[in-house]
Image (cartoon, rainbow, N blue to C red):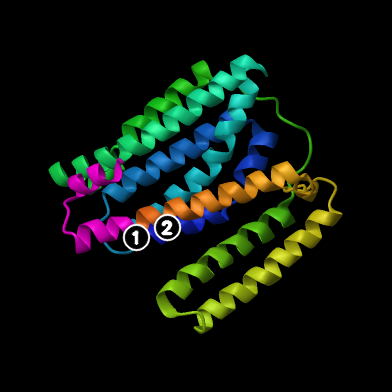
Amino acid sequence: MLNAYTLTFGGLLLGGRAGDLLGRRRVFIAGVLIFTLASFLGGLATSAGWLPAARALQGIGGAIAAPTALALVTTNFVEGEERNRAFGVFGAVAGAGGALGLLAGGILTSWLSWRWVLFVNVPIGVLLASLAPQYITESERQSGRFDLAGALTSTAGMVALVYGFISAAHDGWSNLATVGSFTAAAVLLATFFSIETRTSQPITPLHMFADRNRAGSYAVMLALAAALFGMFFFLTLFVQDVLGYSPLRAGFAFLP
């Protein structure tokens, strides 16, 4: 269930460029609605296949909405003090939301059902999609074309890479599926880099990585995400399965 979300959210790299070409607010709302629908379907799940499928659809919605969220801050607030304040609020809400989510997840699971961890997203998503047109200014749609070859090879390559790590965790590094996934990822991502050096409108302009500060920030974000996701995954299992904490007590234990 967790890997299904990780696979699509980490692999789908189309949201940012789609926002540039189609309008960031429009794409953001579409991503939120897909995530909301997937949450509703996941809460109704009655089989072992249904729930991971809904989680994968959640990942698609998140991958579409996430890149446009920060981009909308830059298009809706004037550069300088106003934009700095907006980014500060964004960061504060993200941090507070992480803490609140730990408690809310424990409360919903302990007092109602695990299904409400998914159902709770539905009214929030509907409200967000309804209010966005009133409070968020649409960005200018950029002219240009979609780098379809780059999008397909990057998305397929990242999915293969993520699946390779998932397979290695379950079946070992020498497993045929693991080796095949990593091989496919290497070929696809090499093809992607080749395409990006030759196309006039790449989905990922490689010159961005030539800037040391920008490349360094990307590396830091990668390390932070890897550490946090790994920590939450294993500590959740540890405090509940080894220490015997309830979901609610586990949520409180995470707060410090």
Dot 2 falls on a residue whose secondary structure is helix
Find residue 197 and report its horizontal and vertical position in percent: 83, 55
The residue carrying mark 1 is 234
Numbered tag placed on residue 230 in the rendering: 2
Locate the C terminus by quadrant: top left
Q: Which residues are magenta?
A: 235-256
Q: Name the one closer to the observer, 128 or 110.
A: 110
Question: Are discs 1 and 2 less than 8 Å apart at CB?
Answer: yes
Q: Quadrant of residue 149?
A: bottom right
At label 1, the amino acid type is Phe
Find residue 9 and report its horizontal and vertical position in percent: 50, 51
- Relative height, residue 199 to residue 186 (above, below): above
Dot 1 falls on a residue whose secondary structure is helix
Q: Name the one closer to the observer, 20 or 243.
A: 243
Image point (46%, 50%), residue name: 59
Q: Quadrant of residue 23?
A: top right
Q: Is residue 92 left or right of residue 181?
A: left
Image point (51%, 49%), residue name: 224
- Relative height, residue 35 to residue 182 (above, below): above
- Relative height, residue 211 to residue 78 (above, below): below
